[in-house]
């Protein structure tokens, strides 16, 4: 008998029929003798609907109240799933994050999990109950409800699995695993049977929303065996069949790993580029600009500085598109007058495309192959950043799909014919 955590995403919970299927699948695992903790998301579209409602009242919603609203989709899901399990004759109990409790910091809308108290959950499991815990939710030190950022139910599930030392964390979603790139963009994307933790971390951080990045961080830190698999298969297929399906995140590189140099292509449309032009080229200028951005709690991604010949320089960086206006406000009011810059501009029509693979460590020429592929498609590269296992470029966003498809082909990632 093992403790298993299942996570079901929005599409998997998208209708009462789908919830009944989730219940049948969980019941099957329970009948095989496992202790089951289930972490569902809100029904698909629900979190978007709630956030849109909030924005109808307040264009920039109060973060505490936004979390109070956004977390309710998961509240509905846990109750419905508990009822569906009871209807199958199982004993089940649902909990909100604060009831467990899942403790977080107070960063509303992007809170981080600090600890999980498992006493109550263990008592239920020992009494034979299936425990269902809301994804996405936590409670801060003052008893406020918090949420973990979009896609945060993945993190709830892996964190619960880590805290309770579960044998497996199974992330059920609407695709049957992690692919070489988003299968919605590239039809012949290929499912990876295994993906290394480091590659998954890069892919998640570079925009592959199949797993929230913090869930991958938890999986790595606590070595949680984590598998991404489909919730849309027949719920009654055998456990053995389920345990070899999907994509397993591995922590050791071994001979079973697929040997591709580039394992995947990630992309992110949530980028915006800002440029501060004509700033004096002297020590401390980067700090004068980025220090103010950090003070405003804005995350900066890529940075580039171009030296001019006239003793001035242009300084560009990217931020989340939602924070473009806030960034421009800070630059225009606090930075431009202080550093005597000529001009501040913003561009929301950019995106980031990245190639990821641990094989890049031992191969040269991968970045240049990427640049060649993009140039053959007539795509201009605006910014570049590299690490040991990835190369990212910022390009105009209208070329995003073209770039992803061309790179997918150039690095031989498509399914075998
Ligand atoms: P859930 O609601 O189950 O959490 P998400 O929509 O958050 O599901 O994540 C699953 C989606 O992630 C897929 O439908 C797919 O479009 C997208 N996706 C992006 N990149 C990848 C990838 N490399 N492999 C698989 N899916 C990906
Ligand atoms: N319901 C939340 C969201 O839509 C959390 C999740 O689905 O993981 O972002
Ligand atoms: Mg998700």
Image (tube, rainbow, N blue to C red):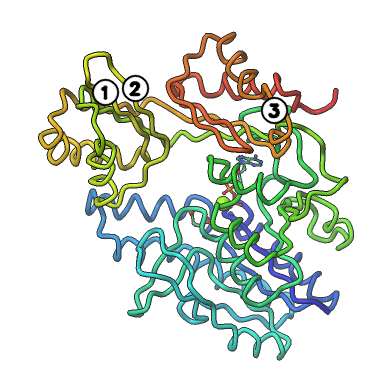
- C-alpha gap between disc 2 and disc 3: 39 Å
Q: Are marks 1 and 2 in contact (CB under 8 Å)?
A: yes
Q: Secondary structure at mark 2?
A: strand
For the residue pair 331 and 180, the one nearer the viewer reads as 331
Residue 111 falls in image quadrant: bottom left
Residue lying at 70% horizontally and 65% vertically, measured from the top left:
224
Residue 309 falls in image quadrant: top left
Residue lying at 41% horizontally and 75% vertically, measured from the top left:
139
Image quarter in which the N terminus is found: bottom right
Q: Secondary structure at mark 1?
A: strand
Q: Is mark 3 within 8 Å of ligand 1?
A: no
For the residue pair 15 and 105, the one nearer the viewer reads as 105
For the residue pair 178 and 202, the one nearer the viewer reads as 202
Image position, residue 33 (x, y; %)? 84, 78
Image position, residue 96 (x, y; %)? 49, 75
Determine crowd level at label 3: few under 14, some 14-19, many 20+ residues with C-alpha closer than 10 A.
few
Q: Which residue is mark 1?
A: 313
Determine crowd level at label 1: few under 14, some 14-19, many 20+ residues with C-alpha closer than 10 A.
many
Q: Which-is-in-front pick, marks 1 and 3?
A: 1
On screen, 258 above or below 144? above
The numbered dot on residue 187 is: 3
Q: Is residue 276 left or right of residue 412?
A: left
Residue 165 falls in image quadrant: bottom right
Q: Is mark 1 within 8 Å of ligand 1?
A: no
Q: Are marks 1 and 3 in contact (CB under 8 Å)?
A: no
Residue lying at 57% horizontally and 19% vertically, measured from the top left:
402
Q: Are marks 2 and 3 in contact (CB under 8 Å)?
A: no
Precedes in sequence: disc 1 or disc 3: 3
Precedes in sequence: disc 2 or disc 3: 3
Q: Is residue 325 left or right of residue 185?
A: left
């Amino acid at each position: 008998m093992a403790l298993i955590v299942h996570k079901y995403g929005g599409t998997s919970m998208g209708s009462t029929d789908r919830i009944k299927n989730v219940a049948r699948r969980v019941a099957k695992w329970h009948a095989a003798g496992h202790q089951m903790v289930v972490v569902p998301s809100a029904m698909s579209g629900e979190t978007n609907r709630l956030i849109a409602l909030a924005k109808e009242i307040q264009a920039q919603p109060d973060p505490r109240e936004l979390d109070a609203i956004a977390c309710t989709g998961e509240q509905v899901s846990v109750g419905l799933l508990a009822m569906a399990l009871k209807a199958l004759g199982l004993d089940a109990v649902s909990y909100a994050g604060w009831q467990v409790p899942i403790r977080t910091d107070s960063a509303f809308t992007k809170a981080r999990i600090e600890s999980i108290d498992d006493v109550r959950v263990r008592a239920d499991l020992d009494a034979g109950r299936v425990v269902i815990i809301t994804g996405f939710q936590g409670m801060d030190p003052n008893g406020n409800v918090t949420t973990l950022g979009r896609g945060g139910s993945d993190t709830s599930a892996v964190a619960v699995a880590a805290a309770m030392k579960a044998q497996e964390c199974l992330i059920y979603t609407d695709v049957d695993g992690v692919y070489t790139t988003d299968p919605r963009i590239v039809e012949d994307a290929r499912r990876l049977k295994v993906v290394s933790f480091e590659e998954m971390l890069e892919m998640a951080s570079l925009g592959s929303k199949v797993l929230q990045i913090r869930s991958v961080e938890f999986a790595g830190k606590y070595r949680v065996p984590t598998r991404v698999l489909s919730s849309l298969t027949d719920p009654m297929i055998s456990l053995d069949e389920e345990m070899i399906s999907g994509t397993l995140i591995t922590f050791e590189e071994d001979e079973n790993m697929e040997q591709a140099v580039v394992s995947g292509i990630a992309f992110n449309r949530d980028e915006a580029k800002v440029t501060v032009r004509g700033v004096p080229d002297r020590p401390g200028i980067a700090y004068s600009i980025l220090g103010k951005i950090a003070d405003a709690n804005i995350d900066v991604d890529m940075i580039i500085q171009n030296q001019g010949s006239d003793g001035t320089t242009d300084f560009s960086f990217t931020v989340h598109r939602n924070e473009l206006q806030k960034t421009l406000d800070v630059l225009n009011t606090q930075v431009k007058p202080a550093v005597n810059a000529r001009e501040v501009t913003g561009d929301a029509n950019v995106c980031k495309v990245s190639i990821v693979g641990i094989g890049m460590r031992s191969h040269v020429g991968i970045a240049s192959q990427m640049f060649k592929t993009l140039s053959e498609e007539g795509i201009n590269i605006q910014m570049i950043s590299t690490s040991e296992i990835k190369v990212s470029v910022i390009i105009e966003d209208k070329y995003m799909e073209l770039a992803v498809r061309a790179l997918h082909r150039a690095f031989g990632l498509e399914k075998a014919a």
